[in-house]
Structures are given as structure tokens and as C-alpha cells.
Image (cartoon, helix red, strand yellow):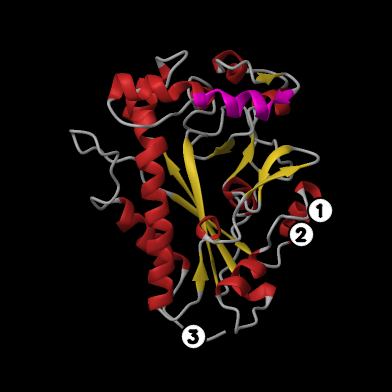
Amino acid sequence: MRECKVSALWIENVTRRFISSPANTMKNKAGEPAWDQPIVGYSNGADSLYEFYRRDIGSFYVTPAEFMRHAYPKQDFKLDQLTVISWVLPQTTATKTDHRKETEWPCERWARTRIFGEEVNDELRRHLVKALVDAGVEAVAPVLSALWRRETSKKYGFASTWSERHAAYAAGLGTFGLSDGLITSEGKAHRAGSVIANLVLPPTKRPYKDHHAYCLFYAKRTCGACIKRCPARAITEKGHDKEKCSSYPDRTHAYVESHYGFKGYGCGLCQVGAPCESHIPEGIEIQ
């Protein structure tokens, strides 16, 4: 690999400066930020998890090298010289406090982060790609690639050609809960993002061996708070019903527009009011 100034610290500084800027906004009258400061992790393009995702989720799943080759068709990329940069953008305390009070509809701050906060996430993807390219490193944001699309997995139902949460799991940022949310050191009330770059960075250690390690229900057979929080009854002790879950936010469009004055939607009620809302639950042993 070429020598360049890009390091993990450099990437984290670029990411955090962006989230500290006015670009991080939920576009309300108070001009509040959509997100708290991110956590960032790294996985290698040759990590066996990416091929496992393709086998397990579906042959449509796109690998890091394929995204890079599509973005840069005249170049060849070696798997072990690619790094997947993953981040988690935690909801603010104010958003979580408001949303915790709700039982059926999204609070205004939550609905704003679902729409305007994800716009911030997209801008962060573009910003980091540009910063890397300007530093001489080829990069691509999978979710913004023409290769990203929704698909149907024979095993899991609703799926896509790239999953930000699965990339974050590979990067050591967290494990999945009963609701399929990713439980991280900042909890599961968040949005995730990623960029693939043509440089080698040390992968973040995965301090877990099981993909449900941080969930009290799976680890201890206790909790199940997300079951009670779900207005669609999409979460049971058997797991998460994606069809029931995905249809519920459609019901919130009219509510958000009539009550908050903008076109939006949201749910995420299972992401708050639970022991994993803002941190890894107490009683979970971290390796």
C-alpha cells in the first residue's frame, strides 16, 4: 500500500468534526443536533464474515471488493488491503427521553432523526469518502452505491445487498438483540453507517463470539423489554417479525405530518425503554 496520512485517528477526527458541525441537525426550530458523537470501528475486507453473510443471507449480498471494483472499474483491489470503516451515531439524550414516553407514535425528535438525521448520515458518508479521496485513498459508501438495493432473503425475508449493522458487527461495535437492533457500547438507539477504503488499518477486536452476546434475553433468558415496547407486536420470544415491523411505520406518516408539520415517519419504540437503550446491559460479561 502507498504511504499516506490516513490513520484510524485521522478517520475518527474527520467523523467527529463533521458530527460537531452545523451539518449535524434535526432541522427543528432550536437547531438541535440529530446525533451524539459517533463510535467508530474497522474490519478487514478479507474478513470471513463478509463471505459468510453472502452464504447466509443470500447470493445477492455484495462484498467490499465488489463495491470497490464497481466504483473504480479500471482498478483491481486485494481483499486484505481493504478496510471497512463502520460507525454508530447515537440518539441524543433529549430524543431518547422524549421517545421513551411514547407507546404508539414516534416523538417529534425521533421522527426528525429518522428523516433529517439519516440525511446527516448520508452527508457523513459523502464527506468521509471525499476526505479519503482527497488524501489519495480510493473509497466508496456502499449504501450510496448503485449496487445497493433491497432484496428478499429466503432465510430472513427483507434484506439488502449491504447491511450497515452487519458491517458494524464485523467491526466489533456490537451484537444483535431480540428485536434485531444492534446493541453497542452506546446502546441500540442509533443509526449506523460505513465506508470502504483502499487502505490497511488494524481491525477492531470483536469482544464477543456470539452474535447475540449483548442481549439479556439470549444471554440470561431475562428481560424481553423490547417485546412490550413494540406497538406492532412484531417482537416475541421467538424473535423479530420483519413483515409486521416494516408495515408499522407506514401508519405513522399521517401522524407525523399532522402533528409535527413535515413529511416523515418512524417507530423505533423498541430501541428505548430497555436496559440496552444507552449501553451494554448490566450483567453482560464482555470478553
Q: Quadrant of residue 80?
A: bottom right
Q: Secondary structure at mark 2?
A: helix
Spatial CA distance of label 1 from label 3 is 35 Å
Q: How many marks?
A: 3
Q: Secondary structure at mark 1?
A: helix
The answer to whether residue 6 is above or below residue 244 is below
Label 1: few (<14), some (14–19) or many (≥20) C-alpha neighbours in 10 Å? few
Q: Which residue is mark 2?
A: 51
Picture residue at 69% right of the left edge, 26% below the top = 241
Picture residue at 63% right of the left edge, 76% below the top = 81
Spatial CA distance of label 1 from label 2 is 6 Å
Q: Looking at numbered disc 1 in the image, what kind of residue is underneath it?
A: Arg
Q: Main secondary structure of the magenta part?
A: helix
| Magenta region includes residue 247 | yes
Q: Position of residue 105 (x, y in %)?
A: 43, 18
Q: Position of residue 212 (x, y in %)?
A: 70, 36
* Image quarter (top left, top right, bottom left or bottom right) of the N terminus: bottom right
| Viewer-nearest residue: 44 or 145 | 145
Q: Disc 1 vs disc 2: Cβ atoms closer than 8 Å?
A: yes
Q: Which residues are magenta?
A: 239-250
Q: Which residue is mark 3?
A: 3
Picture residue at 30% right of the left edge, 47% below the top = 24
Q: Nearer the viewer, mark 3 or mark 2?
A: 2
Q: Looking at numbered disc 2 in the image, what kind of residue is underneath it?
A: Glu
Q: Position of residue 239 (x, y in %)?
A: 72, 25
